[in-house]
Amino acid sequence: MIKKAALSFDKDLFKRSVVYNVKTLYRKSMEEATPQQIFQAVSYAIKDAIVDKWMTTQEEYEKQDPKMVYYLSMEFLMGRALGNNIINLQAHEPVKEALEELGVDINAIEDQEPDAALGNGGLGRLAACFLDSLATLGYPAYGCGIRYRYGMFKQQIRDGYQIEVPDNWLENGNPFELRRPEYAKEVKFGGYVNVYVDENGRSNFKQEGYQSVNAIPYDLPIVGYGNGIVNTLRIWDAQPVECFRLESFDKGDYQKAVEQENLAKNIVEVLYPNDNHYAGKELRLKQQYFFISASVQAAVAKYMRKHEDIRRFHEKVTFQLNDTHPTVAIAELMRILMDEYYLTWDEAWAVTTKTCAYTNHTIMSEALEKWPIELFSRLLPRVYQIVEEINRRFVKQIEQIYPGNHEKIRKMAIIYDGQVKMAHLAIASGYSVNGVARLHTEILKKQELRDFYEMMPNKFSNKTNGITQRRFLLHGNPLLADWITFHIGSDWITDLTRLTKLKVYADDEKAQQEFMNIKYKNKIRLAEYILEHNGIEVDPRSIFDVQVKRLHEYKRQLLNILHIMHLYNQLKEHPEMPFYPRTFIFGAKAAAGYRNAKLTIKLINAVGEAINNDASICGKIKVVFIEDYKVSNAEIIFAASDVSEQISTASKEASGTGNMKFMLNGAITLGTMDGANVEIVEEVGEENAVIFGLSSDEVIRYENFGGYDPMEIFNNNSDVRKVLMQLINGTYSKNDPDLFRPLYNSLLNTLSTSKADTYFILKDFESYAEAQKKVEAAYRDEKGWARSAILNVACSGKFSSDRTIEEYVKDIWHLDKVVLPLKK
Ligand code: 26M
């Protein structure tokens, strides 16, 4: 089958372009060039193919003047660009052939690209999936973020411990980016606000005595799949503002110049590697205001190039706030409208409250952003004045609705107890609040944001997350993608619901065999990766049981590894017991300062070390910790997985998106009724997933009664007791028996300084172990398993980010699709 766009891709031109680029960039022939140099040359050749479409798209946006969404996010976890761009240009076949003819393997070239890891985990990757879907669906959109010099740290495992290594992703340059200094914006920090009354009697607010930096935009193309649309991800770099000539410095100027230079250097230096955890760092607030001020200024300037009346800004622009991190956009827009365009408060408010919409991604209370007033007002004096006024009016409104109810004000005020509460600001000032899975949204409405929901129910809606099938199936699992296309055609690439057509193959024995054979080949590919990176041999015929995600106590990697310790105990005690060989695979980065998370990584590696080298169990269990889990190796891992571990404490995982990527690749979910797992089970049927553990209602009920008593389980369950004792008797830490005591304490807390087992690991242990037995029994039934796996793929249609984006467009953004003119 020859694709339309493949015909329009000029293979010979591409080949000449690659050879030419190698020559002009490196003065080398193809034979002499290194793989990295060929990667650069190929990327520039692909960029050539993108640029025309990019210009046409942007010209068309100029002409048609459609409403645009600005997706404001501190994080965009893009992964690699080259392979994805080739796929979305529908040029994979010709490019692969062309490179073969040049004696080059396309996969080896793709492997040369460092991941663009400008994000931590779920929230950052969701932003990347959304950009792919927006472009593919033809919606006018900008992503706005920060061009961190260093992205998410590289993880090395040394002696079982995580070591963080700086991610110098720009070392060899970024061939796809475009520096655009002509659109630079100045961003001001600190100083004080003076009020001047002008000749019209108008008060003018001026920030003075400030420090400033220049924000320089770098644009990255976001290629839509096969539709000629190319949107823009704009990430901002910081440069010092040029002040005076050196010789004219007096003492004060010199001091200021040095400080401004440092400010510019520090601001975009590094991504904070915390996931679901707020630390209250001053530099983090600077990062937030830096990219928000630049982005809002740019959006307003762009609007004013074509329009007269700033009062109608919201008709052409909507800002989607990716969690509270960009929430300062609300006050910044108010500031620009009032101080620079002289709108009254009411006029500015009318615009702002129709422009900004907020997505909540977590109910973990430690993730809520609350800035100390002292810090906030010192750094952003004018913005703080505006937040104060928003708060004053909001509190007045609460008092009108709930007269005399101080409790409401205490719980809902934007400024309270010396803190600025960013979620409250976002909800009070935005026109939309959404959660990211049905259960999550219900918990927001009934628990966390209950008061806000009661006061303004119409703002709330659910938008269940999704993922892009272009990256996580078409690119990551080409064997399965081809098999699917062979059976049902290629429409699924842009309409994932078409996968339901695969249902008829679920009971077809030939299809089952083909499907499992593809899974087997993908398992060999992962086994090779593991052998190369870990030096561990794993059997691709064993069950690949996988938990890959950020390391966090609520995600309960500890439950998984405790259960592995238990299985190992059983195998040692009963060597003859029936046991289907299993490969347990982990991948996870821990925030650098998160002690229990880092200790869990050490535990996984210590248990792996012991089990993998114990000849007496004949290799029945293997435990592998994949170093540096990231988007590029994730694609290989999902494709090769049999079992998808989604075992968070019910109510804690807002949605999860890894769960969807596993499902799309035919893994069976072993999970709690949490986040989007609930909807996954609803789609595929509970007979095709394995569910265990407390429900979110049960968890919340326990929490409201101050927790539960894990000692009871310790006393009554000898399996649990044995495993827990192994944490503190040196079984996995011979030289330091106390090494894992903090993990033991987190579960039992004999010191009673804090609550014990707050994530219900022991409470759910038995249920989890039962569920794992069901997994084994199910896998032994080869046909039954193949059937379930195929049905998982067939029922995954709902979880495309294309569906999610269509819902945002219909309910929140109200955008129109852009149609490109036919090429002459
Ligand atoms: C906050 C302050 C300082 C430094 C970092 C942060 C921070 C960074 C990332 C806080 C939270 C961050 O991400 C939260 C996150 O990734 N949430 C996940 O969002 C996914 C997409 O909606 C969901 O699928 C996951 O369930 C949710 O955990």
Image: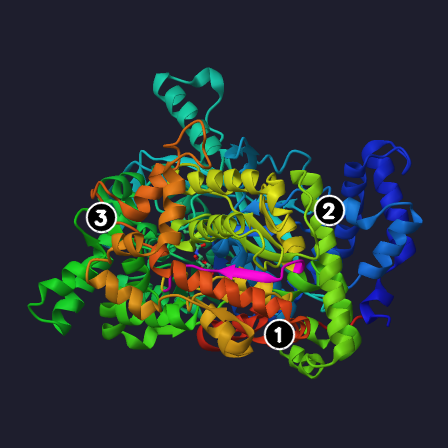
SS state under label 2: helix
Residues packed near mark 3 inside 10 Å, few (<14), some (14 to 19) or many (20 plus): some
Report how far apart the C-alphas of labels 3 and 1 lie in the structure. Answer: 51 Å
Instruction: Please state which amino acid type lies under the numbered disc 3.
Output: Gln
The answer to the question of whether label 1 and label 2 lie on touching residues, with beta carbons closer than 8 A, is no
Task: Please report the bounds of the magenta region as a residue range.
Answer: 639-650
Query: Is residue 650 visible from the viewing direction of this image?
Result: yes
Q: Nearer the viewer, residue 277 or 613?
A: 613
Within 10 Å of disc 1 (Cα), the crowding (few <14, some 14-19, many 20+) is many
From the top left corner, tell me how far across and down residue 426 is, in percent: 33, 60
Q: Dot 3 corresponds to which residue?
A: 419
Quick check: 461 left or right of 230? Answer: left
Nearer to us: label 3 or label 1: 1
Please say if 284 is above or below 478: above
Q: Can residue 134 be seen in this view?
A: no
In the depicted view, which residue is nearer to us: 647 or 413? 647
Distance of label 3 from label 2 (alpha carbons): 52 Å
Q: Mark 1 points at which residue?
A: 788
Q: Which residue lies furthest to the left in this view?
A: 404
